[in-house]
C-alpha cells in the first residue's frame, strides 16, 4: 500500500508540473510581444510606458528559463503575482472565491450521489424493466441539456414564474444562513443534475455488469439475503469503476460550474475568471486554471486511493 | 463487436434502430442550412421599434431585444454552432486518429506521446482551457475551432491507439504482416476499417461536447463574436428580458438541447448497434421454483428428489424446452454423478435444485423436494424467497466450475466465509472466524490463518476451489452439489480435489449426499455410487455406477464410455467435453427431433425411433430411455 501511494503521489506531482509548464509556455509561444498582446483591447494599442511597465511586473524582461523557474517556484508557494488590471493579489482573490466554488461543487456532488447511485443501481438490477426504461430516457434527455440552459430555465421557472427561490446572488453564510442556503439550492441542483446523469449512467452499466459475475451466484448460493448480495457483492464491486469515471468527469463538472456560477451570479472563481478573460488579465486566468487543475488532480488522487481500498487488485497494477 | 478482415469488410445495411436517430439528426443538421428557403429575414437586421415583438405573420417566432427576426437568428445561429462543432470535431478526429494509429503501429516514443498527451489534456477542464486560449487570442470562430480541436484530438488518439493495438494483435493482421504487406496498407486497409466503430462513437460524443462548449462560451460572451448569431448568445441576450418575453430564452434553449439530444441519441444507438453486448437487458432475479404438488412422501434416507422436472425458455408462441422430464433421487451417504456433454442440462438441473435458475429460464412442470435439517421434506416451489435464502447454503450448498471467478475479488477470503456462516447461524464474529479457519485447515490449506486474511487473487485455482469447498461446508449441508468442480483445474490438482471430496464424505460430513456433475467418466468412476446420464435435457440412463459404467444399455452411454481415454492420466484431461466416438453434436434445445432425441447420432437407430419419444424403461434400480435396450425389449415381451 505504501509503495502504491508513493507511486500515485509522484504521478500526480509530475502531472501538476506538466500542467504548469503548459500554462506557462502558452504565453511564450504566442507570436509577438505578450505584453503588447495582453494590453491591446478593442483594437487600441497601449502606450509604450504601460507595456514596459507590464513587462517588468510580469517579469517578461527576464530570460525565459528564469521566468519559468520563478513561475514554478512561486506557484508552489501559492504566489501568483498581481492582477494586471487592478494590481490586487491574485492569490488573495482566489482564496476568497475558491471556497464558494467548492461549496457549490460539494453540494451538487452530494445531491448527485444521493440520487444517482440508488437510481442507477435500481435501473441496473432491473435492466429493461419499467423503471429502467423511464429513468434511462429521462437521463438521456437531461444529459443533453447544458448546465447554463438548465440554470436559465430554472431561474425562469423557480424565480420568475413560481417565485419560490431567489434568481441568484450570494450572501455569506455567517451573515444570513437561511438566505445563503436558499441561494445555494438552484446552483447546487444545476451542477448536481449534470453530474447525476453521468453517475446514473455509469452506476447502471457497472451494476449490470457486476451482477452477472459468478461470485454473485456464489453469494446467493451461500444463502445471503438479496439485500446483502446486492450491497456486498454487486454494489461494492460496481462502485470502483463509477468513482473513477466520476473523477475523470470532474474536469467537465468544474468547467460547467463556471457557467452555472455566471448564470446565478454566484461570486465564485467564475466571476473572477470571466472578468479576467474579458480584460485579458493573463496572470489571473493562468492562476485560476492552475488551481483548478491542481484540485482536479488532487481529487483524482484521492479517488485512486479510494478505489484501491475498494478493490485490492488495483494496487498491483 | 468482432473484427473482420479488410477484404470482407462491407458497409452493413442500416439497422432498423438507427433509422429514427439518423433521420432526427440529419433533419437537425440540414434545417439550419436550409435557412434561406425557410425565411428571407436577415438575422442581424435591427428594428428597435419592434423589439420583443410577439410572433407574427412576418416573424414566426417573434423578434428579439433588438427587433431582429428570431427564426432567422435561430437558424443562422445553428449554422454557426454546427459548423464550429463539426469542423473542430473532424479536425480532432483526423489528427487524433492518425496520431493513435502511428502510436500503435510504431510504438516506442510515439506510443508514449499518444497515451501521455491525453492524460495531460484531460487534466484541464475543457472550458477553462478554451478560456485560457481566448484570453490570448481573443474570442472568435477561428479561435473556437482551434481550441476545440486541440482539446479533443487526444481522446481520438487514445481510442484509435487502444483499438488499433487490439486489432493489430489479431491473427489475420499478424498474418498479413508476416506475408510482408507494407505497413501503410495494413494500417489503412486493415486496421482503419476495424476501428471505425469506436471512433465514430467518439465522433458523435465529441460533436455534442463541442456544441455545448461553443454555446457556453458564447453565452459568457467569449465565443462567437456579435453580431453573428449563435444560440449561446441568444440565451445571453434574452436573459434580461425573460420576464416579459420567455419565448426569447425558450427558443434557443430548445434548439440547443434538441440538437445535442439528437447527437447523443444517435451516438447511443450507434454504440448499441456496434456493440450489442453492452446493452444486456434482462433482470437479475433468479426465477422461482414452482410446484405441481406431486412431491412429498419420500423414504427416510432420501435427501432430495427431483420429479418430472421441466424447464423452458419462455418465447412468444412456443416455449423452448431445455429440460424435459428429469427425475432424480438423491440419498444420504451417496454420491450421484450427473454425466453428459455440455448443454445436456446437467448444470441447469442442479441450479434448479438450488433455486438459482437464471431469470430467462422457467420451471414449467415438476417438483423439487429437499429434506431440511429438521428432517422435514420441503417443496422448493412452495417456499417464500426468504425461506429459500434460508435453505441455500444451509441445507444444500454448491461448488461451481470456475474457482477463479466464483469468489468476489474485492473481499477477503475469510470475510466471504464468515458471511456464509453468519447468514445461517448468528454467533460472535470471533467464533465464526475460528470455525472458518478450522474449515480452511480441514480442506488442506496451509497457513489457514494467513489465507483467511488474504484475497482470492493471491491464491491459485486449486486453492480457491478448496476455499469454495470449505465455504460450502460451513453450515454442514445435507446435500452438496459440485458442478464440474475440477474442469477448470490442472490435471494434478483435479486429482487432489477429488481426493479431498472423497475424504470429506467419509471423514467429515456424515450422511452427506453429493451430486457430482461431470462430463469426465474417469473421475465419475472414482467417486460415484450412482450415475445418471443426461442427453439433450433428458436422463437417458440411470442406475448403480458399477453397472452403468461396465454394462451400459443406452447407445449414448456406450459412446461416452468409448470416447473415454484409457489411461488414467488422460482420464483427467479437460478435453472430454465433446464426444469423439459418435458423429455430430447434440441438437439445440429448439431443434430437437421427434421421437428419440439421440436417433440422429445413434448407430443402432431404427425407423420407428423417430415416432415416439422413448419413456424410461426398467425396474426400480436401473432405468434406460431407449427402445432397443434390454429393459425395453423385456417390457414389450
Image: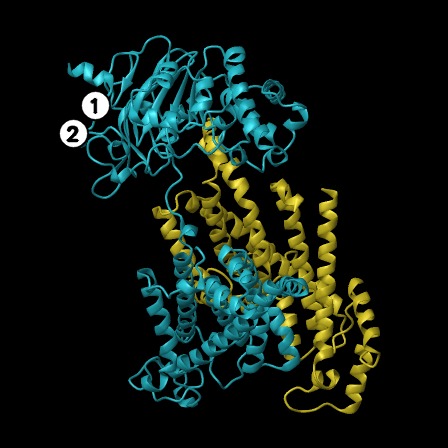
Chain colours: A yellow, B cyan
Among the 4 quarters of the image, the one containing residue A247 = bottom right
Q: Is the N terminus of chain A in the top left, top right, bottom left or bottom right quadrant?
A: top right
Vertical placement of residue B173 versus B618, above or below: below
Disc 1: which residue: B627
Residue at left offset 81%, top offset 84%: A53
Characterize the local packing of mark 2: few (<14), some (14-19) or many (20 or more) Cα atoms within 10 angstroms: few
Vertical placement of residue B153 versus B592, above or below: below
Residue B522, position as x, y percentages in the image: 45, 23
Horizontal side of residue B36 vs B124, given as left or right:
left
Q: Nearer the viewer, residue B287 or B65?
A: B287
Vertical placement of residue A229 versus B112, above or below: above
Residue B325, position as x, y percentages in the image: 26, 26
Q: Is residue B538 visible?
A: yes
Q: Nearer the viewer, residue B366 or A270?
A: B366
Q: Is residue B395 visible?
A: no
Label 1 or label 2, whichever comes before in sequence order: 2
Asked if marks 1 and 2 touch (Cβ < 8 Å), the reply is yes
Amino acid at each position: 500500500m505504501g509503495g502504491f501511494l508513493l507511486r500515485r503521489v509522484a504521478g500526480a506531482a509530475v502531472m501538476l508540473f506538466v500542467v504548469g509548464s503548459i500554462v506557462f509556455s502558452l504565453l511564450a509561444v504566442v507570436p509577438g510581444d505578450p505584453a503588447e498582446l495582453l494590453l491591446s483591447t478593442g483594437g487600441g494599442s497601449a502606450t509604450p510606458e504601460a507595456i514596459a511597465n507590464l513587462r517588468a511586473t510580469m517579469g517578461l524582461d527576464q530570460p525565459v528559463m528564469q521566468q519559468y523557474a520563478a513561475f514554478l517556484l512561486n506557484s508552489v508557494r501559492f504566489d501568483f503575482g498581481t492582477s494586471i488590471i487592478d494590481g490586487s493579489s491574485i492569490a488573495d482573490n482566489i482564496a476568497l472565491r475558491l471556497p464558494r466554488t467548492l461549496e457549490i461543487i460539494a453540494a451538487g456532488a452530494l445531491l448527485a450521489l444521493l440520487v444517482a447511485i440508488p437510481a442507477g443501481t435500481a435501473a441496473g438490477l432491473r435492466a429493461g424493466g419499467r423503471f429502467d426504461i423511464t429513468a434511462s430516457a429521462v437521463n438521456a434527455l437531461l444529459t443533453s441539456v447544458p448546465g447554463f440552459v438548465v440554470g436559465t430555465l430554472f431561474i425562469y421557472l423557480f424565480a420568475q414564474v413560481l417565485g419560490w427561490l431567489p434568481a441568484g446572488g450570494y450572501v455569506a453564510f455567517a451573515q444570513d444562513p437561511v438566505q445563503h442556503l436558499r441561494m445555494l439550492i438552484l446552483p447546487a441542483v444545476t451542477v448536481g443534475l449534470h453530474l447525476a446523469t453521468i453517475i446514473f449512467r455509469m452506476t447502471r452499466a457497472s451494476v449490470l455488469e457486476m451482477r452477472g459475475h459468478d461470485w454473485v451466484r456464489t453469494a446467493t448460493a451461500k444463502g445471503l439475503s438479496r439485500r446483502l448480495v446486492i450491497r456486498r457483492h454487486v454494489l461494492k464491486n460496481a462502485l470502483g469503476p463509477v468513482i473513477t469515471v466520476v473523477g475523470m468527469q470532474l474536469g467537465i463538472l468544474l468547467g460547467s460550474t463556471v457557467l452555472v456560477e455566471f448564470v446565478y451570479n454566484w461570486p465564485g472563481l467564475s466571476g473572477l475568471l470571466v472578468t479576467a478573460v474579458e480584460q485579458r488579465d493573463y496572470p489571473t486566468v493562468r492562476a485560476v486554471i492552475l488551481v483548478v487543475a491542481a484540485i482536479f488532480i488532487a481529487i483524482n488522487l484521492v479517488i485512486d486511493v479510494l478505489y484501491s481500498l475498494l478493490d485490492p487488485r488495483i494496487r498491483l497494477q | 463487436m468482432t473484427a473482420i478482415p479488410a477484404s470482407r469488410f462491407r458497409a452493413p445495411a442500416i439497422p432498423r434502430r438507427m433509422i429514427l436517430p439518423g433521420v432526427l439528426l440529419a433533419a437537425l443538421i440540414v434545417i439550419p442550412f436550409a435557412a434561406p428557403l425557410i425565411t428571407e429575414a436577415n438575422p442581424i437586421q435591427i428594428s428597435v421599434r419592434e423589439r420583443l415583438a410577439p410572433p407574427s405573420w412576418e416573424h414566426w417566432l417573434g423578434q428579439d431585444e433588438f427587433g431582429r427576426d428570431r427564426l432567422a437568428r435561430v437558424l443562422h445561429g445553428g449554422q454557426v454552432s454546427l459548423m464550429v462543432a463539426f469542423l473542430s470535431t473532424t479536425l480532432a478526429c483526423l489528427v487524433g486518429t492518425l496520431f493513435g494509429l502511428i502510436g500503435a503501429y510504431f510504438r516506442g516514443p510515439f506510443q508514449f506521446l499518444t497515451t501521455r498527451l491525453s492524460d495531460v489534456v484531460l487534466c484541464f477542464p475543457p472550458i477553462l482551457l478554451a478560456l485560457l486560449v481566448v484570453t490570448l487570442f481573443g474570442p472568435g470562430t477561428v479561435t473556437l475551432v482551434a481550441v476545440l480541436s486541440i482539446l479533443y484530438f487526444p481522446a481520438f488518439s487514445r481510442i484509435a491507439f487502444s483499438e488499433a493495438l487490439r486489432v493489430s494483435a489479431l491473427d489475420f493482421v499478424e498474418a498479413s504482416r508476416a506475408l510482408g504487406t507494407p505497413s501503410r496498407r495494413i494500417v489503412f486497409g486493415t486496421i482503419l476499417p476495424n476501428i471505425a466503430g469506436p471512433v465514430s462513437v467518439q465522433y458523435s460524443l465529441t460533436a455534442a461536447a463541442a456544441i455545448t462548449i461553443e454555446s457556453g462560451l458564447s453565452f459568457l460572451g467569449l465565443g462567437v463574436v456579435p453580431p453573428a448569431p449563435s444560440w449561446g448568445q441568444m440565451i445571453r441576450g434574452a436573459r434580461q428580458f425573460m420576464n416579459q418575453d420567455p419565448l426569447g430564452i425558450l427558443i434557443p434553449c430548445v434548439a440547443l438541447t434538441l440538437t445535442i439530444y439528437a447527437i447523443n441519441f444517435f451516438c447511443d444507438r450507434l454504440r448499441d448497434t456496434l456493440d450489442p453486448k453492452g446493452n444486456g437487458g434482462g433482470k437479475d432475479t433468479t426465477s422461482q421454483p414452482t410446484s405441481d404438488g406431486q412431491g412429498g412422501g419420500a423414504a427416510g434416507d432420501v435427501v432430495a428428489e427431483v420429479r418430472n422436472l421441466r424447464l423452458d425458455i419462455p418465447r412468444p408462441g412456443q416455449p423452448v424446452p431445455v429440460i424435459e422430464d428429469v427425475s432424480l433421487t438423491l440419498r444420504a451417504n451417496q454420491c450421484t454423478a450427473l454425466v453428459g456433454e455440455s448443454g445436456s442440462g446437467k448444470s441447469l438441473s442442479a441450479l434448479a435444485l438450488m433455486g438459482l435458475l437464471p431469470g430467462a429460464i422457467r420451471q414449467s412442470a415438476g417438483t423439487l423436494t429437499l429434506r431440511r435439517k429438521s428432517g422435514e421434506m420441503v417443496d422448493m416451489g412452495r417456499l417464500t424467497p426468504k425461506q429459500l435464502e434460508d435453505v441455500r447454503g444451509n441445507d444444500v450448498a454448491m461448488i461451481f466450475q470456475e474457482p477463479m471467478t466464483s469468489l468476489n475479488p474485492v473481499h477477503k477470503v475469510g470475510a466471504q466465509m464468515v458471511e456464509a456462516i453468519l447468514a445461517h447461524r448468528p454467533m460472535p464474529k470471533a467464533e465464526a472466524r475460528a470455525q472458518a479457519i478450522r474449515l480452511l485447515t480441514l480442506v488442506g490449506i496451509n497457513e489457514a490463518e494467513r489465507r483467511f486474511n488474504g484475497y482470492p487473487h493471491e491464491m491459485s485455482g486449486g486453492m480457491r476451489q478448496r476455499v469454495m469447498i470449505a465455504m460450502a461446508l460451513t453450515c454442514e449441508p445435507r446435500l452438496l452439489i459440485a458442478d464440474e468442480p475440477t474442469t477448470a483445474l490442472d490435471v494434478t490438482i483435479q486429482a487432489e480435489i477429488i481426493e479431498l471430496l472423497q475424504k470429506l464424505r467419509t471423514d467429515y460430513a456424515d450422511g452427506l449426499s453429493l451430486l457430482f456433475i461431470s462430463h469426465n467418466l474417469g473421475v465419475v468412476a472414482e467417486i460415484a455410487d450412482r450415475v445418471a446420464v443426461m442427453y439433450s435435457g433428458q436422463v437417458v440412463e440411470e442406475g448403480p455406477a458399477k453397472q452403468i459404467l461396465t454394462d451400459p444399455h443406452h447407445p449414448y452411454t456406450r459412446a461416452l464410455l468409448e470416447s473415454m481415454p484409457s489411461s488414467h492420466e488422460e482420464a483427467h484431461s479437460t478435453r472430454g467435453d465433446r464426444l469423439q466416438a459418435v458423429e455430430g453434436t447434440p441438437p439445440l434445445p429448439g431443434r430437437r427431433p421427434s421421437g428419440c432425441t439421440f436417433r440422429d447420432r445413434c448407430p443402432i437407430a431404427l425407423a420407428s425411433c423417430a415416432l415416439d419419444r422413448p419413456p424410461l424403461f426398467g425396474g426400480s434400480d436401473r432405468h434406460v430411455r431407449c427402445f432397443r435396450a434390454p429393459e425395453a425389449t423385456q417390457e414389450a415381451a
